[in-house]
Image (cartoon, coloured by chain):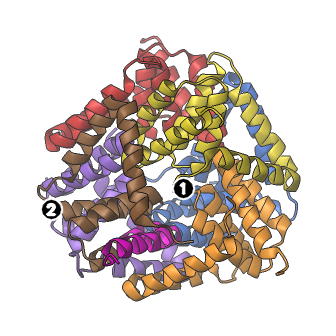
Chain colours: A purple, B blue, C orange, D yellow, E red, F brown
Amino acid sequence: MKKDYVTYAEDIDSGVAQLFTGVPGPMRAYSQLLEEASKPGSLDAKTKELMAVAISVAIRCDGCIAYHIRAAHKKGATRDEVLETIGVAIEMGGGPSVVYGAEALEAYDQHAAPAG
Amino acid sequence: MKKDYVTYAEDIDSGVAQLFTGVPGPMRAYSQLLEEASKPGSLDAKTKELMAVAISVAIRCDGCIAYHIRAAHKKGATRDEVLETIGVAIEMGGGPSVVYGAEALEAYDQHAAPAG
Amino acid sequence: MKKDYVTYAEDIDSGVAQLFTGVPGPMRAYSQLLEEASKPGSLDAKTKELMAVAISVAIRCDGCIAYHIRAAHKKGATRDEVLETIGVAIEMGGGPSVVYGAEALEAYDQHAAPAG
Amino acid sequence: MKKDYVTYAEDIDSGVAQLFTGVPGPMRAYSQLLEEASKPGSLDAKTKELMAVAISVAIRCDGCIAYHIRAAHKKGATRDEVLETIGVAIEMGGGPSVVYGAEALEAYDQHAAPAG
Amino acid sequence: MKKDYVTYAEDIDSGVAQLFTGVPGPMRAYSQLLEEASKPGSLDAKTKELMAVAISVAIRCDGCIAYHIRAAHKKGATRDEVLETIGVAIEMGGGPSVVYGAEALEAYDQHAAPAG
Amino acid sequence: MKKDYVTYAEDIDSGVAQLFTGVPGPMRAYSQLLEEASKPGSLDAKTKELMAVAISVAIRCDGCIAYHIRAAHKKGATRDEVLETIGVAIEMGGGPSVVYGAEALEAYDQHAAPAG
């Protein structure tokens, strides 16, 4: 029953594209918010992406895990960094964060696996 | 990996029916609550249903999206009204509401599609 | 122990102003998102504000209640419309929404009270 | 800065009374739901009330803690039973449940204290 | 579209095992927390497990439902006890808890069904 | 109506101490979880603390903000780092994270202010 997180992230891209067409005003502003919040400053981009992963796990948002794990992987986050991020989420979320943390690790491993 | 939201809403109907049999006291009262909260008054029934959609997206409840999008469609909500409802949810929920808003739009489009 | 919701909304304005100074990029984008999501379209501005109230109650966000009840009052929402919005939130949130719905009603009544 | 949880629970009673007057349909149904869900069956009333406490802590609902701790105390829940209930909430909610669990214990101790 | 909750709980076991290998420090401590919070004291182990089910439904955590329903079944919780637990969750969570409560009942029935 | 976040964090310390006495098994395990999740590894301690702040804001947990902002300040987090952390939370939480992000900034400024 394991999800295919690579495909899942792509499905979200399609859904987001549909929202952009349907409700462009809020979506353009949201997109700007995402860009502004994610760009490097006092904290680098990878750290910010891992923070988004931490929140995604803590709030039990499967689609957010798919989306932000892909981004964290692209920005060079290592498996160990993802694991320690999950550790923080578990401290902040208990058992439910264990369940969603396991999803985040699975998603990371799918993105990190050599294409075959 | 797209969900079939029409079937999903029907699955929820079956699950609710089982709960009615198993725990009739609370379920009858809940059902009454749903009816009282949904019926037209100062706000019309469609607006109230769209509010339920807004909450469903903001709290990331997939099944609630399936259930309340079907009801909103039945009560005559247009695609544009659903989109603007999603816009409010995105303002109140950020990225996670984008993910679940996309699900709500997909669900609406499945209900609105001509049967084939 | 009743909160002064008029002052509370003003405190939020001050806090938001501080965030604007401190982290202007994301805040400008968020502000744009708020504007885009709130402006009239297929749904009028008052309805959208009441949706934000519904979400605020359902997610148990006290400050959000203070902020969006003030806005709903400014946009002409009546006490009955706020009450029916709370009704939807109660259906979607159970007992916790009763607790926060009572806060929303108190906030509305404070804004609606003749200054004296 | 400790809250007075006895007064807080009474404030909630007042707020609920206002909602009953303002939006009687949904409130009567909710009230019926509360009664049906709380009454003894396979599980006794005290156990059910402690479950409501567990949920209140896990979802970080201060007012719900005030309300359901009072009810649990009235139904004879001991301090140890409340503490073990908080333990379950901590397992299910991590650090945030520690914060709100401490509030629940404080609320219990205020209700259990001899009037003086 | 019904989930296979027996397999789902086993998938969570696998995911948890991976987390144990990857981030052993936090996971060992979490595991100790789970054990301490679950063991009988003033409240028996079955009651505590049902509290975890109540929280799982109220916070809409599918994986948590799979995990804690299995445990509740193992610890001898009856169908009626699970149903009344769901009733409490519905009072504390409204419609979304109806949706997830139906999942919990389905999960229970799958575990309780005679293999064959 | 501004909270005194320095005192608030100390109140939480007292509440946690009471829980330790009352329910030592789960609290010792939770404490170990906090220690394991917070200690430096692939990510340094300050970054992990800022992640806890990000989650605290995103889940709207006032007490968690008080607790983790104090810890982040002690571990050397700068005002700019806290602000960018709030930015990520706003992207992941929308308007409610603006409200609680403002609380986090206020809390930081109170801890950073020279005693006088």
Q: CA distance from mark 1 to mark 2?
A: 32 Å
Locate residue D104 relative to residue C113 in the image: left or right: left
Q: Is residue B10 visible?
A: no
Identify which residue is drawn at 46% across, 35% down. D86
Main secondary structure found in the magenta portion: helix
Near-viewer residue (C111 or B35): C111
Residue identified by numbered label 2: F44
- Three-letter code for the amino acid on which mark 2 is drawn: Asp
Residue identified by numbered label 1: B59
Check residue A94 for magenta coloring: no
Identify which residue is drawn at 83% across, 75% down. C113
Q: Examine the image and state in which quarter residue C106 appears.
A: bottom right
Q: Position of residue D90 (x, y in %)?
A: 40, 39
For residue A51, above or below residue D84 = below
Q: Secondary structure at mark 2?
A: loop
- Three-letter code for the amino acid on which mark 1 is drawn: Ile
Locate residue D59 relative to residue F115 in the image: left or right: right
Q: Chain of mark 1?
A: B
Near-viewer residue (F10 or F53): F10
Q: Secondary structure at mark 1?
A: loop
Q: Are marks 1 and 2 in contact (CB under 8 Å)?
A: no
